[in-house]
Amino acid sequence: MPLPRAKSRKSAGADAQTSRFLWLIGIFVIALMGIVGLKMFFSHLYDELGERSANERARLFIGEELVSTLLRIEKDVYQMSTLTHATAQKRLEQRISEHVAKMHHDLDVLKNGGRVRQVVYLNIEGHDQMVREVAYQPDAEAHGYVMELIEIAPQLDLVMTKVQELRALLGKRALLREQNDSRGLFALEHEIAVYLKHIPPYFFRLNENANRLFFDSSDRLQELQNQLAAQRDYFKTTEMVLVALIIVLATLAGFVFARQISASNQRLRLAVDEMRAAKDEAERASRAKSDFVSRMSHELRTPMNAILGFAQLLASEALTKEHRDYVNEINQAGSHLLELINKVLDLAKIEAGQLTIEQIPFDLRQTLDEVAALVSERAKGKGLELRFYAAPDLPAGIMGDPTRLRQVLINLIGNAEKFTLQGGIDIRIESVAEGKQIQFSVQDTGIGMDAEALARLFQPFAQADESTTRKFGGTGLGLKISQDLVHAMGGEIRVASESGKGSRFWFSIPAIAAPERVKKASDETVAATEKTRSHADAPLRGHVLLVEDNRINQMVASRMLDKLGLTYDIANHGGESLEKLAQRDYDLILMDMEMPKMDGLEASIHIRASENASGKPRTPIIAMTANALHEDRDRCLASGMDDHMAKPVEMNRLDELLRHWLPVR
């Protein structure tokens, strides 16, 4: 018999625990609902007081606007009396009329409700402005406004009457001046002075009423803020009491919540790990794309070297006019394709985050001269006037990346030249921001762009419109790359344009002064250039070692060397070049980078080591390679090479480098 009783006690205990738990949950829910209800109640009060406070701030704003507008009217009235030109007086009278109309509108808003707008011009030209607009609804308790509204409006109309009377007096003054009536003019000036002395009382009354509106609004706003503070304190006290009641319940529920949070954190960690893995995969994909584009650039440059190389060789032959036109078309198409390859490669590097910006000292004016030399011939061929202006206060040497700066300027000038059919292009370089920045501006007289076209700028493979693409060509990559390069150099590129009236692109970069040695290095560079110019007309002399594994590239380079009057030997890879150098001396070495058995970098290292060990004079080594990236040039120079020339090889560029590096005979 005891067993059923025990079961009964256990059952009763379980029921009691269940009941207590249910009561606990019930209390928790009731307290929670009480807090929620209280929050909703006070939230409603806050909203109501907040709306009243906002409405009162709007009224304060309107009162401030009335005062400031009235001051502007008073200033304009006195300014009108100083003007002698009828047109200026008329314009000022119109402005006063606009101010009066605005005050009438603001007064009507105070009476019936509505919106008041304030426009603040941020510069003299009025291009930039700040607009503030408020809405106001009349408050039934705002009885103090009635007198102000009744008194201000008629006074405003009277002000306009006074302005018109003053305008009439000023008209008489102008007439007397034209008639050279000094006596009448003196009498009229006295009349105007007396008239102006009677104007201040009108404005004094208006100011008195407008200021009363302003200060009354300030007092009411302060009262509302005090009410808000009192309500907030009361709510905090009530809330603290209720929070104390549910703190025990929250503690009991905390354990359950902690377990749920732990599970959520675990899921979050898994999600973060998945996101990190996805990010790494995306970065690997981006690097793979960049590497693929780089490889494709290298592979495309090899056949491009043959196409453009043989085209250049053909151009030097005695051809018919028709055949010469064909060769020119091949050269132009090949150059365009090469430009596209370079832009796609740059864009891939930028998107992969592999763009590097140097911070080296360079001569700014020399860089500008190089840009001018590169772009002037094409503009001249179209009959366009290319005007460069470099401010005299520009620093001679600055820190930065001259290669990327040249690239941006050539892109912008080339873009301007492409879309300009007549007129000219102005390139201005000036110090701005108190000498802390250098601004570059390119302005043309071309076809320009409308607002819709401007919105599509700086997007890859985007042009102003399809008809422009068909007529002028282009991919839109140049502007996108230019924007990214300017950003990477610490600047911002901007554009202003109007359809049919041309465009202006401008950007700024930091003007960081370079060390004094830049000037010396610049002078040495100029001297070296003048030296090359060591014999520009003299025939080339020398025996060259051509290190190249590709048969077509061997043919192109050897034919160019023949045309330039040089003798040469050919090595098929870096190891063979070492063997030939062991047999005889060469005046210069043209070295490819990627070759079987031994590449050009390793071969150059061995050559320099051998020269150092034997005491032989240094033989100039010029990289002639399809690896055209900036970092490829750095790798070549680091291995001991003296210069870098990217394929496809331009015969003029080859001639220039050879004249620079070959010994003078």
Image (tube, grey):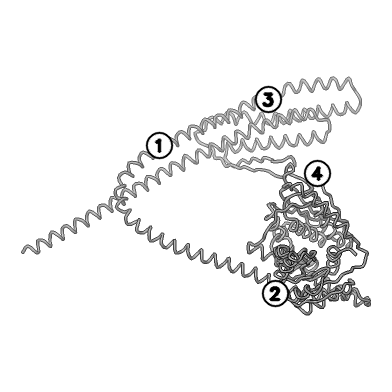
Rendered image quadrant of residue 74: top right
Pointers 2 and 1 in contact (C-beta within 8 Å) = no
Q: Disc 3 to disc 2, how far (Cα)?
A: 97 Å
Q: What is the secondary structure assignment of the residue under circle 4?
A: loop
Q: What is the secondary structure assignment of the residue under circle 3?
A: helix
Residue drawn at (67%, 26%), measured in percent from left and top? 203
- Extreme residue toward the left, this view: 1
- Callout 4: few (<14), some (14-19), or many (20+) C-alpha neighbours within 10 Å? few
Pointers 1 and 3 in contact (C-beta within 8 Å) = no
The amino acid type found where label 3 is placed reads: Tyr
Where's residue 435, x and y in %? Answer: 74, 43
Residue 651 located left or right of residue 40: right
Of the two numbered discs 2 and 1 on the same chain, state the one appearing first in sequence.
1
Identify residue for label 3. 202
In the displayed structure, 306 sits above or below 178; it is below
Where's residue 572, x and y in %? Answer: 76, 78
Identify residue for label 2. 598
Q: What is the secondary structure assignment of the residue under circle 1?
A: helix
Identify residue for label 4. 393
Residue drawn at (66%, 62%), measured in percent from left and top? 350
Q: Disc 2 to disc 4, how far (Cα)?
A: 51 Å
- Callout 3: few (<14), some (14-19), or many (20+) C-alpha neighbours within 10 Å? some
The amino acid type found where label 4 is placed reads: Asp
The amino acid type found where label 1 is placed reads: Asp
Of the two numbered discs 1 and 3 on the same chain, state the one appearing first in sequence.
3
Q: Which mark is residue 162?
A: none
Q: Nearer the viewer, mark 2 or mark 1?
A: 2
Of the two numbered discs 4 and 3 on the same chain, state the one appearing first in sequence.
3
Identify residue for label 1. 233
